[in-house]
Image: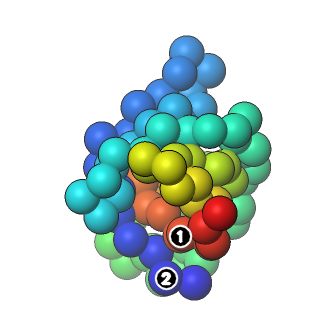
Amino acid sequence: MRLEEITGVMLDFDGAPVGFNYQGKSFLVASRPVRWYSRRLWWEDAAAAPKGAGAALLEVEMWRLWAASGDVRFFFELSHQQPDDRWEVNQLNSQ
């Protein structure tokens, strides 16, 4: 899985993504996003972990959704990295 950082993530009132910028294009979410939490390989980041970070090191918020840029829709998997509020994306396919 190749992850790339994305910017300009816009969220709705429930915290679900509704839009983001990726590879110089603006995308609008075109489906209801599905959220779940994944476990992180905490031992890879443990040396750089700030004291008291705890749960933010163990769980990563994940989203699967369709998003459109122009006439093309893509299926994405987004991950929300805490505590630094960083978003990453894996483009799965297009339609």
- Counting from the top left corner in percent of width and height, residue 42 is at 56, 73
Question: Residue reaching furthest front?
Answer: 71
What residue sits 59% from the left and 32% below the top?
Answer: 16
Query: Residue 70: which numbered mark, if any?
Result: none
What residue sits 62% from the left and 38% below the top?
Answer: 30
SS for dot 1: strand
Quadrant of res 41: bottom right
Front-most of 34 and 94? 94
State yes or no: discs 2 and 1 in contact (Cβ < 8 Å): yes
Q: Tell me the crowding category of disc 2: few under 14, some 14 to 19, or many 20 or more residues within 10 angstroms, Cα based.
A: few
| Quarter in which the N terminus is drawn | bottom right
What residue sits 53% from the left and 21% below the top?
Answer: 12
- On the rendered structure, is 64 left or right of 1? right
Front-most of 88 and 26? 26
- On the rendered structure, is 16 left or right of 52? right
Query: Residue 90: which numbered mark, if any?
Result: 1
Give the amino acid type for the residue marked by disc 2 in the picture.
Answer: Arg
- On the rendered structure, is 21 left or right of 56? left
Front-most of 65 and 3? 65
Give the residue number, with chain letter if any, for mark 2: 2
Give the amino acid type for the residue marked by disc 1 in the picture.
Answer: Asn
Front-most of 36 and 71? 71
Compared to residue 33, the image places residue 84 above or below, namely: below
* Label total for image: 2
- On the rendered structure, is 38 left or right of 50? right
- Counting from the top left corner in percent of width and height, residue 58 is at 61, 61
Camera sees residue 26: yes
| Quarter in which the C terminus is drawn | bottom right
Q: CA distance from mark 2 to mark 1?
A: 6 Å
